Amino acid sequence: MKALVAFEEGYWGQKYPAVCRRRNWEHVVSFFAFPEGVRRIIYTTNAIEASNSKLRRAVRSRGHFPGDEAAMKLLYLVLSNAVEQWKRAPREWGEKTQFAVIFGERFFN
């Protein structure tokens, strides 16, 4: 906390005050209470970004659609094919034992 206050009062804190705002501070602090490996799993958006990329690629390759229903069918098919990949454990899940230690019986293998 001392380092944060020093940063706020220092050159960069004065130059960029928006960076120093403490919105949702209680959530940020609780996030950093987790070990680094667990934080990496929690904050990653790779799965979401990969899904969005697949959807964009499918729509872009088709160009245009006769109607909304045709576009929805394509998106459904792309996502249903992606479900198989979602069943595989992410590479970062080597740290899943940390979840078992932290969350106990709430964590399922």
Image (cartoon, rainbow, N blue to C red):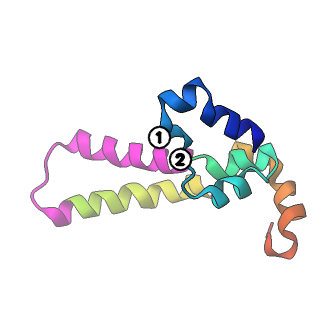
Quarter of the image holding residue 76? bottom left
Which residue position is annotated with label 2?
21
Q: Residue 92: horizontal and vertical position, in percent?
A: 73, 44
**Looking at the magenta stretch, what is its main secondary structure?**
helix
On whether residue 56 falls in the magenta region, the answer is: yes
Q: Which mark is residue 64?
A: none
How many callouts does the rendering have? 2
Residue 7 located left or right of residue 70? right
Residue drawn 57% across the image and 58% down it = 24
Decide: marks 2, 1 in contact (CB < 8 A)?
A: yes
Query: Closest to the observer: 6 or 62?
Result: 6
Q: Name the spot of residue 69 as percent of width and height, x first.
A: 18, 66
Identify the residue position indicated by label 1 in the image: 18
**Of all residues shown, which one is farthest toward the bottom?**
105
Q: In the rendered view of the protein, which quadrant contains the C terminus?
A: bottom right
Residue 34 higher or lower than 68, as above or below: above
Q: Which residues are magenta?
A: 46-70
Extreme residue in the top direction: 11
